[in-house]
Image (cartoon, rainbow, N blue to C red):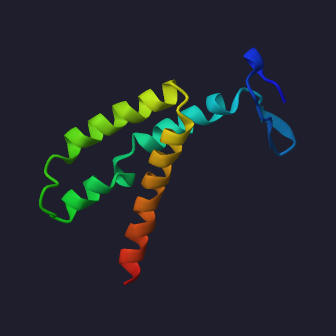
Amino acid sequence: MAGRGGEFSVPFNAGGSTFCDRPVSGCLSRALRRLLDNRYVYQPYWDHQNGLAGSDDWEARFATARKASHAALASHATGTVLSIVFQRLYTPHCQDERRTL
């Protein structure tokens, strides 16, 4: 379905009402930014919390990673954004596995 400016859009139907008829990037942008800005899904944060050597600079690295991820979102670099998102989603998965060991 064509959206504004000829971009592809997907209407999201939540409970019978259309939630979002903007381009997919517009609908997901806020959720992606919240994920990318969350230190708890950033592995170097957990490395620092666990006292691993070389992780003292996690905050500076996180700030750099945030800027890079926001730039990728702004330039519609889908592959880069997906790579970062999957990396961030893998972090809580690993944390959960460590708890069950």
Q: Position of residue 49 (x, y in %)?
A: 21, 60
Count the labels in the image: 0
- For this orientation, the residue located farthest to the right is 16
- On screen, residue 49 versus residue 73, left or right, reads left
Classify 72 as above or below 39.
Answer: above
Name the residue nearer the viewer: 65 or 80. Answer: 80
Residue 13 placement (x, y as % from top left):
82, 41
Q: Residue sitting at 37 percent across and 33 percent down?
A: 68
Q: Quadrant of residue 76?
A: top right
Q: Residue furthest top?
A: 5
Q: Position of residue 71 (x, y in %)?
A: 43, 27
Return the residue nearer the eye: 100 or 80. 80
- Relative placement, left or right, of 79 versus 22 is left
Q: Please identify the quadrant where the N terminus is shown.
A: top right
The spot of residue 30 in percent (x, y) is 55, 33
Q: Quadrant of residue 24?
A: top right
Where's the C terminus, which quadrant? Answer: bottom left
- Identified at 84% across, 37% down, the residue is 17
Q: Is residue 6 left or right of residue 33?
A: right
Q: Residue at x 23, y 60 (%)?
A: 47
Between residue 81 and residue 95, name the one nearer to us. Answer: 81
Which residue is drawn at the image coordinates 56% and 33% (left, top)? 29
